[in-house]
Image: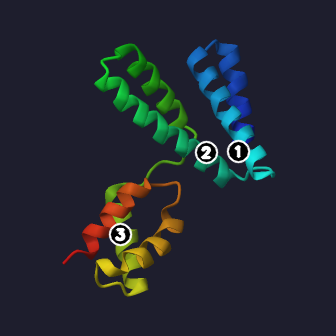
Amino acid sequence: MNLEEQLMEEMKQAMKTGDKVRLSTIRMIRSSLKNKEIELRRRLEDEDVMKVIQGMVRKGEESLEQFRSGGRKDLVEKEQAEIEILKSFLPQPLSQEEMIRIIDETIRETQASSLKDLGKVMKAVMPKLEGKADGRVINQLVKERLSP
């Protein structure tokens, strides 16, 4: 079962159980996916679906910070619930130790020795960690590993 089919099944389940937050979040995901399909003019693969959902999580986390700074507790709770639902459709993120191990492996493979090689390492490591870790965290860890 691909990710889009899983979303349809989850949406049906949310309708049956009356879970309004889950239902509206899944509908929001499906709407974003449809827009992406129209933009790309092709059916989406699971990787594309994950990228769309990851983008939605990132936007939700940014909104969460704004709601917190604005003192909107009601919106904070709603946004947190939506983010948790979005994350449930993504693969489990790697632990920091696993990311560091993969980054160190990639640094050895690319024979990187300094921060000048950051781009080369990032280009090699991103396909390995795609969907399993946040790009900003990966970038920060690579910089730390390459710093003298």
| Residue at the image point whose x is 64% and y is 29% from the top | 28
Amino acid beneath label 1 = Lys
Residue on which the image places disc 1 = 36
- Tell me: 82 left or right of 108: right
Amino acid beneath label 3 = Arg
Answer with mark 1 or mark 3, whichever residue precedes in sequence.
1
Amino acid beneath label 2 = Val
Residue on which the image places disc 3 = 101
How many residues crowd mark 3 within 10 Å: few (<14), some (14–19), many (20+)? few
Give the image location of residue 80, x and y in percent: 43, 27
Q: Is residue 144 visible?
A: yes
Give the image location of residue 110, x and y in percent: 42, 84
Image quadrant in which you'd find residue 113: bottom left
| Residue at the image point whose x is 60% and y is 15% from the top | 20
Answer with mark 1 or mark 2, whichever residue precedes in sequence.
1
Numbered disc 2: secondary structure:
helix
How many residues crowd mark 1 within 10 Å: few (<14), some (14–19), many (20+)? some
